[in-house]
Image (cartoon, helix red, strand yellow):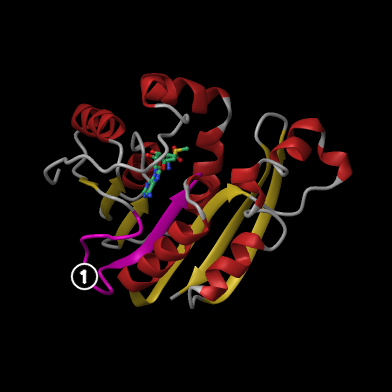
Amino acid sequence: MAALSRHDHHRPGLGHARLTPLYDTVVRLLGVPRLHGRLLEQADVRPFCAVLEIGCGTGNLALQVKRTQPAAHVTGIDPDTRALASAQRKAARTGFDLSWDCGVAQQMPYSDGAFDRVLSSLMLHHLDAEQRRAALAEARRVLAADGSLHVVDFGGTVDHRDGFIARRLSHTARLADNYDNGLLSAMNEAGFARVTEVEQRVSRVLGRIAFYRAER
Ligand SMILES: C[S@@+](CC[C@H](N)C(=O)[O-])C[C@H]1O[C@@H](n2cnc3c(N)ncnc32)[C@H](O)[C@@H]1O
């Protein structure tokens, strides 16, 4: 792992650094591993693909990439040093070799075109509009010419049948920008091509979740 340094101005996974040790238990209960599995099917990671997860947190998705495609080169970046330390411990336990970097998605230490796939799971809603713009521009910069971005996050179009939680979340200040065409527009504005909403799912606890795919 690259030297860990402190990066301020980020929201940890559960909103507060003290809660990071509970992160894996909470996301398991929320069914996040199933979302990861679906995102990975969409990303179609091939052997020797270079894969980057932005906002990798405790490394669950990055590790799942490695489990499903052991010949892929997988890197995770996140500003939360506690979450990264947990990712690193889990990788050591499983014997998988991944790279973990401490940093923010808006300014990444990778060369242009370094990755075939960039993945983002439940991360973009942590960013304000300016940070999100910068993070998507960086994701595009680090993708190879034929590379693709795969995103799962709060999003899609909430309707009255979605239930109370989905409707409430869609009005939360931090999440509101994601819904309707918010994420699609942000990816288009960042210069991605063939930006597609692949599917939407409604979870009783997380509300409406959408999957997106975009090409460099
Ligand atoms: C809800 S967690 C998701 C973690 C992981 N992607 C998953 O699906 O389990 C959001 C993560 O985004 C990270 N994050 C927040 N701001 C970030 C930024 N500016 N750049 C990269 N990651 C960021 C947080 O530290 C946290 O680990």
Name the main secondary structure of what is drawn in magenta: loop
Residue pointed to by mark 1:
111
Location of residue 201 by image quarter: top right
Outermost residue on the left side: it is: 3
Q: Residue at x 50, y 35 (%)?
A: 33
Residue 68 seen in this snapshot:
no
Q: Is residue 166 left or right of residue 118?
A: right
Residue 14: image location, x then y, percent: 47, 29
Location of residue 145 by image quarter: bottom left
Q: Is residue 69 left or right of residue 109?
A: right
Question: Is 18 included in the stretch rendered in magenta?
Answer: no
Q: Which contiguous range is marked in magenta?
A: 105-122
Residue 110: image location, x then y, percent: 22, 64
Outermost residue on the right side: it is: 160
Relative depth, front residue between 15 and 148: 15
Split into 4 quadrants, where in the image is the N terminus?
Answer: top left
Location of residue 66 by image quarter: top left
Question: Is 117 included in the stretch rendered in magenta?
Answer: yes
Residue 64: image location, x then y, percent: 38, 41
- How crowded pointer 1 is (Cα within 10 Å; few <14, some 14-19, many 20+) is rated as few
Q: How many marks?
A: 1
Quarter, ligand 1: top left
Q: Is residue 214 left or right of residue 77?
A: right
Residue 206: image location, x then y, percent: 65, 34
Reply above or below: 141 against 130: below
Q: Residue at x 64, y 44 (%)?
A: 173
Residue 153 seen in this snapshot:
yes
Reply above or below: 1 against 140: above
Q: Residue at x 55, y 37 (%)?
A: 34
Reply above or below: 187 against 103: below
Kind of residue indicated by mark 1: Ser
Reply above or below: 163 against 193: above
